[in-house]
Image (cartoon, helix red, strand yellow):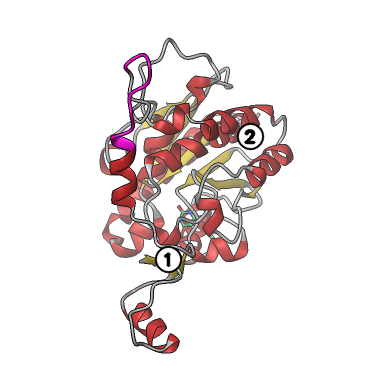
Amino acid sequence: MIMSENPQPNSLSAEQALRFYLDAGVDETIGTEPVDRYAVSLASAKAPKAGNGANPALPQAKSRPTRQESAVRHPPETVAASSVAGQSAVASAGAATNLDELRAAVEAFDGCSLKSTAKSTVFADGNPDGRLMVIGEAPGGDEDRQGLPFVGVSGKLLDLMLESIGFTRDTAYITNVIPWRPPGNRKPTPEEVALCVPFLERHVALVQPEVILMVGGLSAKTLLNRTEGITRLRGRWEAVATPDLDTPIPAIATFHPAYLLRSPQQKRLVWRDLLAVKEKLDSAPAS
Ligand code: URA
């Protein structure tokens, strides 16, 4: 749960108020003033109509997107795709010619509010020259503290999963759809995801792995631009096609290790997905 900094129940000492919030499950402070989100969204829905009769608060019908515009794909109808921040994400991701530049571009990007509540920008770990790229969802608390993806409990399980098919962090490359921890580990909004997609797509294009393992529903839905859940998407070979890739990259989705920790009976299916990755790579000579 998240609470802005100031509100204190009347007549409580600071310590009592803090205890009250902790007991209520608050684990983040994200601002100095409370914001009534319902009032904000109501106001933007009622925004006056522009001269052409279009309501600027609603997504506008667009002419055919250019190659760069189409890089913000998920979901294309959101405000993020046509916002200044969205266009800036497309431009700065597209300008990166190598991974160092891309990391710097992500670190410099201020268009996604998740950055302001996170301690670190979690870019990637592992070997960018490896054959396998693993793409998870978003950093959690441990990742935020250490600035590296998948270093908490579910990361330990991911390491074991990768080891089972012969990979380590020296041979696989690991990143996430979202580089900043959402406060309280909440689900990122579609707008937040859309703002990160240009960086993710550029990341894939710069690494150009032979195979992508999409870990968790958010990863699979975002990379494949699909709406089905992970139970439907996992275990099938798909292709990740981004605007900068000449050839789509074979990709397979599997359950997130955090889900496996809660539902260990699903490990059987994950083992199948991992074997499919191994077979795919074994059947093609390393390039
Ligand atoms: N879960 C993810 O999807 N990514 C991380 O880096 C950590 C947990």
Residue 108 vertical position relative to residue 155 in the rendered view, above or below: above
What secondary structure prevails in the magenta region? loop
Classify 10 Å Cα crowding around label 2: few (below 14), some (14-19), many (20 and above): some
Question: Looking at the picture, how far across and down is residue 211, in whole percent?
Answer: 52, 34
Indicate the quadrant containing the C terminus: top left, top right, bottom left or bottom right.
top right
Closer to us: mark 2 or mark 1? 1
Q: Give the range drawn in magenta.
A: 44-53
Question: Looking at the picture, how far across and down is residue 131, in whole percent?
Answer: 60, 37
Query: Residue under circle 2?
Result: 207
Query: Residue under circle 1?
Result: 4
| Of 279 and 39, the residue lying toward us | 39
Residue 203 visible? yes
Q: Which amino acid does label 2 sit on?
A: Val
Is label 2 in a helix, a strand or a loop? helix
Residue 52 in magenta? yes
Residue at the image point whose x is 46% and y is 70% from the top: 5
| Of 56 and 111, the residue lying toward us | 56
- Tell me which numbered mark, 2 or 1, is placed earlier along the sequence: 1
Drawn side of residue 54 relative to residue 180, left or right:
left
Q: Which amino acid does label 1 sit on?
A: Ser
Residue 135 vertical position relative to residue 56 in the rendered view, above or below: below
